[in-house]
Image (spheres, helix red, strand yellow):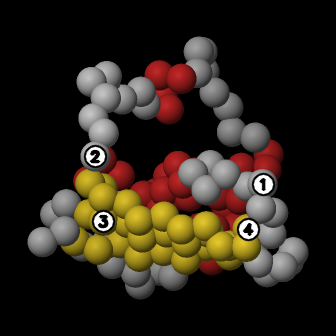
Amino acid sequence: MMIINIKPLSVNQVWQGKRFKTKTYKLYESELLLLLPNNYKVPLGNLEIVLEFGFSSKLADWDNPIKPFQDVLQKKYNFNDSRIYRAVVEKKIVKKGQEYIYFEINEIK
């Protein structure tokens, strides 16, 4: 294990000035809000999120889609993502047109 003694930087601290949602993100958000099941229940307590992203490009960074997807999840299911204490993220390569996102939200016991 390696420990680096530095305060982690948040995405909010990375950009200067106000950020605006792109048309692509607005479309993604509205489509995702419709596709996510209405009856999914986010557990109480501290959470673990399990994500699997099916990309059609090997060049896609595994971590880029996490925050936008997570932000839509918290909007849809009315929870604060500060409750997420653990994440398991996997990148899979699929054929073009077969991209997907798999997710689970579990309580850490």
Name the quadrant containing residue 22: top right
**Label ID, residue 6:** none
**Label ID, residue 48:** 3
Identify which amino acid the numbered label 3 is placed on: Glu
Q: Is residue 59 left or right of residue 70?
A: right
Would you say the residues marked 3 and 1 are in contact, meaning their CB atoms lie under 8 Å apart? no
Question: What residue is disc 4 on?
Answer: 55
Q: For the residue labelled by badge 1, is the local secondary structure a helix, a strand or a loop?
A: loop
Q: Classify 10 Å Cα crowding around label 3: few (below 14), some (14-19), many (20 and above).
A: some
Q: For the residue labelled by badge 2, is the local secondary structure a helix, a strand or a loop?
A: loop
Q: Can you tell which of label 3 and label 1 is closer to the viewer?
A: 1
Identify which amino acid the numbered label 2 is placed on: Met
Percent x, y of residue 90: 54, 68
Question: What residue is disc 1 on?
Answer: 59
Residue that protrudes farthest toward the right in the picture? 96
Q: Is residue 100 left or right of residue 105?
A: right
Closer to the chain start, of discs 2 and 4, is 2
Q: Can you tell which of label 4 and label 1 is closer to the viewer?
A: 1
Closer to the chain start, of discs 3 and 4, is 3
Instruction: Measure how far apart labels 2 and 4 are at the Cα level.
Output: 29 Å
Q: Can you tell which of label 2 and label 4 is closer to the viewer?
A: 2
Q: Residue at x 30, y 39 (%)?
A: 2
Percent x, y of residue 37: 51, 82
Question: What residue is disc 2 on?
Answer: 1
Instruction: Measure how far apart labels 3 and 4 are at the Cα level.
Output: 22 Å
